[in-house]
Amino acid sequence: MHPDLVLRFVRLGLVEPVAGTQREPLFARDAAPQLARAVRLRRDFGMDYAGAVLAGELLARIDRLERRLARYEQIGLRSNSPSRPSYTGGAGGTSVQRPRTRK
């Protein structure tokens, strides 16, 4: 990826250098997949840079939420509790996990 393109994504807030200099910044390991996703969104869907950044951030958030949901579902499958909802605290509120019905 061209360095000017990386700097454009830095200005848009997609990635932040973690070390290095302004001329030669160093990025975290997870920066490469974020940059690649933004470039694919731009190329494949004709998005502008800001739109590609926003879409990439939203897709990453969806991925995190799906992983979190999978963990909650695994916990629910392991518990032998009766079919009552379990209440779990979260940041900024309370969430309810409903028991899964078996077919």
Image (cartoon, grey):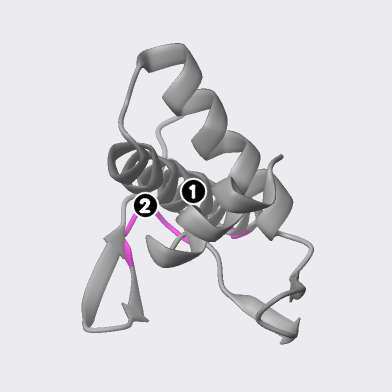
Front residue of 3 and 85? 3
> Looking at the picture, how far across and down is residue 83, in whole percent?
37, 52
* Extreme-top residue of the structure: 44
Choose top left, top right, bottom left or bottom right for residue 52. top left
Q: Nearer the viewer, residue 68 or 11?
A: 11
Q: Secondary structure at mark 2?
A: loop
> What's the amino acid at mark 2?
Ser
Rendered location of residue 28, percent (x, y): 74, 70
Residue located at (73% from left, 85% from top):
21
Determine the main secondary structure of the stretch shown in magenta: loop
Q: What residue is shown with label 1?
A: 60
Q: Quadrant of the N terminus?
A: top right
The stretch in magenta equals 79-86
**Depth check, front residue: 60 or 31:** 31
43 lies above or below 54: above
Q: Which residue is mark 2?
A: 83
Q: What numbered label is drawn on residue 85?
A: none
- Please give left or right for residue 18 compared with residue 66 in the image: right
Label 1 CA crowd tier, 10 Å (few <14, some 14–19, many 20+): some
Q: Looking at the rendering, which quadrant does residue 56 occupy?
A: top left
Which residue occupies the foreground of this view, 24 or 98? 24
> In the picture shown, does residue 52 fall above or below 61?
above
Whether residue 44 can be seen here: yes
Asked if residue 103 shows in the view, the reply is no
Q: Residue at x 57, y 36 (%)?
A: 37
Q: Earlier in the sequence, mark 2 or mark 1?
A: 1
